Image (spheres, grey):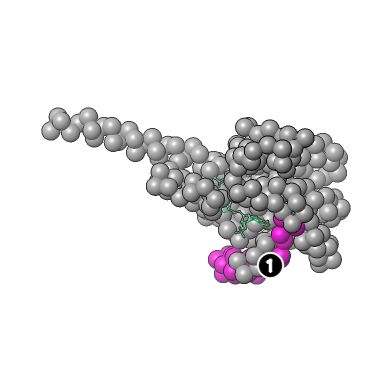
Amino acid sequence: MSRYVLPLSVLGTVVGGAVLLRDYVAGGACPSKATIPGKTVIVTGANTGIGKQTAMELARRGGNVILACRDMEKCEAAAKDIRGETLNHRVRARHLDLASLKSIREFAAKITEEEEQVHVLVNNAAVMRCPHWTTEDGFEMQFGVNYLGHFLLTNLLLDRLKASAPSRIINLSSLAHIAGHVDFDDLNWEKRKYDTRGAYCQSKLAIILFTKELSRRLQGTGVTVNAVHPGVARTELGRHTGMHSSAFSSFTLGPAVVSTSSHCRLSGSPSALLLRKIPR
Ligand SMILES: NC(=O)c1ccc[n+]([C@@H]2O[C@H](COP(=O)([O-])OP(=O)(O)OC[C@H]3O[C@@H](n4cnc5c(N)ncnc54)[C@H](OP(=O)(O)O)[C@@H]3O)[C@@H](O)[C@H]2O)c1
């Protein structure tokens, strides 16, 4: 019997450690019961992952939710899922490809035409560690989608957000920004060897710098701007790396999930941030 004690205690420690790690990396839980009837929310990249769960939770809480996605088939399917799950029929799918300035302008024009008010913009979409691709306009893909695309979108919708104040902008960043360095002489990685990780970190640092400066400029307008690290969740983000699909990740990372109406756990907190002081 005694020869089993050591291996069993090691196993127990490893399993317990993994459970604690999973809880830690998953980020905070949101205890808010706030509802948002009549509030119009846009979530980019809402067909899957954290964006879809954010849209789901906000629809459950009564918002008019617009899913902004590049693939309309996936977008319509996600909107249908969310309507079915939440019984909120005010969930719509709209086309937005953040790798195309033309598409961003078309999306913003449509929103401006269709929506009298926009209360919340969740800049969630991202691509991580893809090959050295460029956007339609020639920008390095991760910088182009994760940062520049959201920069343009936010600025195009700013008048609507200001007119709908109190309103808010939530930018999904990542702890990865800590390792980021913005190379202003070579934003597109044309002079250096392309580093997929460095490019992701650069894009996530850029969105934090943007958040800080924009929030400073918007002081007094009733529009708040926040950046959030959502915790680590098993989503499609690692599609170019295999990360998040390894056996270790499957065990330690939870899927992006939300909630009951009284307790949402979004593997982090775009909706927690949003619901903490929900504009009324
Ligand atoms: N998951 C994590 O552990 C984690 C950790 C830290 C930060 N984050 C951040 O959380 C956010 C959500 O990530 P996630 O994990 O939910 O990733 P995900 O499952 O890969 O979802 C990313 C979303 O972005 C969309 N997207 C990609 N390129 C786009 C483009 N050109 N135009 C419009 N939409 C585009 C994707 O659409 P398609 O399905 O059509 O590709 C998808 O809907 C990201 O900003 C990410 O950096 C995530």
Quarter of the image with the N terminus is top left
Asked where in the image residue 54 lies, by quadrant, the reply is: bottom right
Badge 1 is on which residue? 92
Task: Count the labels in the image.
Answer: 1
Q: Is mark 1 within 8 Å of ligand 1?
A: no
Q: Is residue 72 left or right of residue 38?
A: left
Along the viewing direction, whichever of 94 and 28 lies nearer the viewer:
94
| Residue 235 visible in the current orientation | yes
Give the magenta-colored segment's residue range.
Answer: 75-100
Q: Tell me if residue 174 comes above or below residue 38 in the rendering.
A: above
The residue lying at 30 percent from left, 36 percent from top is: 12
Three-letter residue code for mark 1: Arg
- Which residue is at the front of the view, 69 or 274? 69
Place of residue 136 in the rendered image (x, y in percent of width and height, measured from the top left): 74, 57
Vertical order, 90 against 187 (above or below) = below
Q: Disc 1 on helix, strand or loop? A: strand
- Of all residues shown, which one is farthest toward the left? 1
Q: Residue at x 74, y 49 (%)?
A: 139
Q: Position of residue 160 (x, y in %)?
A: 84, 55
Measuring 45% from the left and 41% from the top, which residue is drawn there? 22
User: In the rendered view, does 109 fall on the left or right side of 269?
Assistant: right
Residue at position x 64%, y 48% in the image: 132
